[in-house]
Image: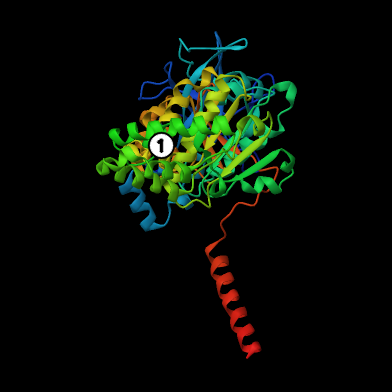
Amino acid sequence: MDSGPGAAPTHSSPPAIDGSGEPSVHRDAKGVPIVGTVISTLEGTPNTNEFHFVIQGEGVKKGQFVQVQSPTGPVLGVVVELSRSNRYFERAESVAEYERLGVLTAQFPTAEWEYMVAAVRVQGVLNGAHLARSSLPVAPGHPVHCASDDQLKTLLALDEHGLELGTLLHHTLPIKLSLSRLLQKHLAILAMSGAGKSYLAGVLIEELLDRPPAKGRIAVVVIDNHGEYAGFKDSPYRARVQVLDGAKMRIGLRHLSASQLAEWSSMSAVARRALDAHVSALKKRVKETHNPEGLDELIEGVRSDAGLNKKENVRGPLLEALEELKYLRVIGAGDSFKPADVLKPGHLTVIDLSGVDSLRKKQILVAHYGRKLFRQRKKGLIPPYVMVVEEAHNFARERAEKHNALAKPIIETLAREGRKFGACLCLISQRPVQLSTTALSQCSSNIVLRITNPFDLKHIGESCEGIDSRMLDSITSLRVGEALLLGEATGAPVFVSIRKRRSQTAARGESLEKLAQEFEDKNKRKEDEIEAFL
């Protein structure tokens, strides 16, 4: 006869209980704690890809790494799901009847028959310092242990001298990633608004600035849309930080061709050919006189061109396009940013675009200086660098008309070719589905924080290698400060708890309550001053 309303448990007998009423801790012959026992299930496990084990105690968490000894070496795996069972609550009709009588928990040892089962995805077998593919399943009945730090360092290909982003979730192991593995083939940081993208980028920048010269340093350039990185100028790193005001930045006309000017404005092919002669003449004059000239001189030259006076259908649209560029206030007599003078190993350059309202002006600045950086890096004039692009979907949108995607070509070029020259990209976006597939697919490493939009999740699943449906489901429940790291930077996809910033930079943007309070206080002071004056 059954001792309760449910069927007998199919996987395990209840865990042993010590005198305190808590599950006792089992240890193997070497005294190492055992967290569970491998079981055989109806799902066909254990197999070479997955196994299940009954948990002993409450110490196992989803995302935790475990290991089981096998004849070929320790089999490492990660807990991908947990389920809880109890024989007394398996049959709904019996539970309802006993609860009506109020005797279920009073008359039967329900707590003793509760158990948890963990599903584990196999990562591989450790063979010395190498990780090999698992060719045999683990044996039912074998004890399961927590993976050691040394095993995890081998599994995850961690670098003792790498960039420390945080700790492995549910472990105490610091996640230190190789500079080359993380950045050389580009990095994407993807998350919804408020999930901690900029904070994580700040941690990464700190690691790059703190890196000693003996370990190899690179320069950092940040395309800052909202002024979130300008605060580094007031941090302990201030001596190695330069912030450039995008609203005051200018591109030297003598460095531009007629084709580039035509690309940045609404200009026909006929108008471009007419402009080409004037741009060439302007460059020749500047070279001879050493007097810099800007758009005003170019516009005046077009306006006074006697030959164009007879071609009003060309002259009018050309002048209109040049006036449009002049209105943007982005082209001047000379460049305001000389990469060779600014970019240094272990230094940060922030291009602050928070004061620029025009998206076209932002696009032009990123397109020009992105191209200039890459060109000078190929010539060896500047050190290896990483260009961090905030709101990358605004600069390299997947589906956008050419005049609204001026920076897209250089970002995609860097994504395809930059690694060969030490020109690295870090793309940060809250709308992965809108980001260029070409650029995103070239990012060999991805750090994904919390995302709930189903279209973005689907796009991540299709663009990022090594991610499965269970991981995608976990992304929606990540807390602020937690991230999924996958790709070439690490040997296996892992969940990471991002470390705290070493410097508190003054990011712009206050709470809504504070902004509202400051507005009312300001108005009240004005009213008080007016009243006192009267």
Residue 434 vs residue 194, the one in the foreground: 434
| Residue 212 point in image, percent of width and height | 74, 27
Does 51 sit left or right of 502 as displayed? left
Q: How many marks?
A: 1
Colour style of the rendered protein structure: rainbow
Q: Is residue 438 above or below residue 311?
A: above
Does 57 sit left or right of 190 as displayed? right
Q: Which residue is under mark 1?
A: 261
Residue 302, quarter of picture: top left
The residue under the point 67% across, 37% down is: 206
Residue 529 vs residue 73, the one in the foreground: 529
Q: Residue furthest bottom?
A: 534
Q: Residue furthest front?
A: 306
Can residue 368 be seen at all in this image of the molecule? yes
Disc 1: CA contacts within 10 A as few (<14), some (14-19) or many (>=20): many
Q: Quadrant of the N terminus?
A: top left
Can residue 400 be seen at all in this image of the molecule? no
Q: Quadrant of the C terminus?
A: bottom right
The residue under the point 74% across, 44% down is: 236
User: Element type at marker 1?
Assistant: helix
| Residue 272 point in image, percent of width and height | 34, 34
Q: Is residue 164 above or below residue 68?
A: below
Residue 171 vs residue 68, the one in the foreground: 171
Does 420 sit left or right of 467 as displayed? right
| Residue 428 point in image, percent of width and height | 49, 38
Residue 196, quarter of picture: top right
Q: Is residue 275 above or below residue 227?
A: above
Under mark 1, the amino acid is Leu
| Residue 202 point in image, percent of width and height | 61, 41
The residue under the point 71% across, 33% down is: 210
